[in-house]
Amino acid sequence: MEYIELISMNDLSSFITRQSEGSIKKELGLYSIPYPVSTLQFRDFEAGHYFDWHPAPQAQFIFYLEGQVEITASDGTRKTFKAGDILFANDTQGKGHITNTLTKGRAIIVVIDPTQTQ
């Protein structure tokens, strides 16, 4: 399973990297390792919303169901997310990133439980 991770560096800048999660084969398919989570939210968004520099409020997976969102990391890298893409927003310190909603859409946000370790 692949996803894109937005990471904070020691100098508090952020960058985007592709991650590949190991899989465990089970009867119904391939599974990732389990992640302890604290909340799940559904989000609808409109086109044309621009959110200037901000860090992620907490480590969270964002599963894009519809629409397009452009993320700009503080190193200048841009990535457009669309239906089926997964973002692990883990740049919880420093300058963060810019979020620009290009189209109307929907997403599921799953927050990693900070009191648990993997």
Image (cartoon, rainbow, N blue to C red):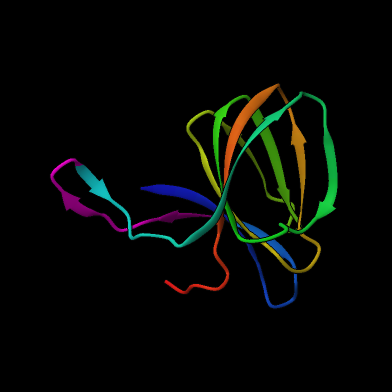
Percent coordinates x, y for residue 27 in the rendering: 13, 44
Q: Residue furthest left?
A: 27
Q: Quadrant of residue 38?
A: bottom right
Identify the residue at image location x=50%, y=58%: 37
Percent coordinates x, y for residue 68 in the rendering: 64, 28
Identify the residue at image location x=74%, y=31%: 101
In the rendered image of this protein, does residue 1 appear above or below residue 100? below
Q: Is residue 86 left or right of residue 100?
A: left
Label tally: 0
In the rendered image of this protein, does residue 18 appear above or below residue 27? below
Percent coordinates x, y for residue 92 in the rendering: 70, 65
Identify the residue at image location x=74%, y=52%: 76
Q: Is residue 29 left or right of residue 116?
A: left
The answer to which of 98 and 115 lies nearer the viewer is: 115
Is 22 covered by the magenta stretch?
A: yes
Question: Magenta region: which residues?
Answer: 17-28
Q: Residue furthest bottom?
A: 10
Rendered-image quadrant of the C terminus: bottom left
Is 70 covered by the magenta stretch?
A: no
Identify the residue at image location x=33%, y=60%: 33
Percent coordinates x, y for residue 70 in the rendering: 69, 37
